Amino acid sequence: MELMEAIRKRRSIRKFKEDKIPKEDIYEIIEAATLAPSAHNRQMWHFIAVSNEAILKKMGEAVVNEIEEVSSWPELDEGMRIKVRGMKAYSTFFVKAPLVFVVLIKPYHSMVDELSKLKGGSKGEIEFWHPRLEIQSVAAAVENLLLAAADKGYGACWMGGPLIAASALKEILKIEDPWQLMALVPLGIPDQEARPKVTKKIEEVLEFRE
């Protein structure tokens, strides 16, 4: 598949067939992820490929439990409570995928961090200076992962919702600091029709300075 074809065909897929993913495909998909650019080539990423059904079930239960806990907060009005509980549907479908990539990220300290310390600025100023290079780097890796998956005919979905239970997921997966969860990416053969992607017109997102 040509690159632009893979980019145009990539969709967020949330229903998968039960077929297992061959390990050679997993290796090639992660190889593509690791070819992404990263700040100073530090490669602040790590991937856990989870196919164990018992582990996936525990992960799903952890997400549901956390959503229930948040929905019980007394600060929430009834409308917000309903919205929070509605998170279950789009935060737990990964449990039924034949494979889930758990994407980890670790902190990256750049020259900006050192300058910020020397400057002694406020938290707001430091945040403004900080380019979040580790997030930019790992996000590039995830995009490569998604495109490599699409190239092989798989469907996948970049998920952040399950991270509401990040602490519990770290415990289930035995993830140790400094590693943190950044995303889950369930993957498999699609068992749904891909919806047409609606994008903004190029004129809305591009401007020139000539």
Image: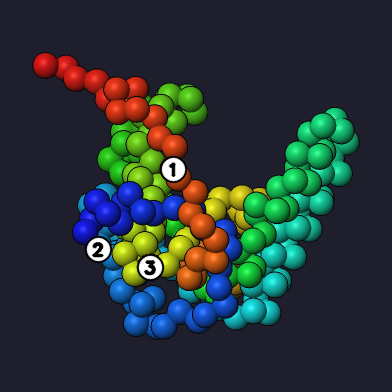
Residue 16: x, y in percent?
55, 68
Label 2 packing within 10 angstroms: few (<14), some (14-19), many (20+): few
Q: Residue 197 carries which label?
A: 1
Residue 131: x, y in percent?
35, 36
Q: What element carries label 1?
A: loop
Q: Is residue 150 visible?
A: yes
Label 3 packing within 10 angstroms: few (<14), some (14-19), many (20+): some
Q: Quadrant of residue 206?
A: top left
Q: Foreground: 210 or 176?
A: 210
- Relative horizontal placement of residue 42, taking residue 135 as reference (left or right): left
Q: Foreground: 8 or 183?
A: 8
Quadrant containing the C terminus in the rendered view = top left
Q: In which quarter of the image is residue 121?
A: top left
Q: Earlier in the sequence, mark 2 or mark 3?
A: 2
Q: Distance between the residues labelled 1 and 2?
A: 19 Å
Residue 198: x, y in percent?
44, 37
Q: Earlier in the sequence, mark 1 or mark 2?
A: 2
Residue under pointer 2: 1
Q: Earlier in the sequence, mark 1 or mark 3?
A: 3
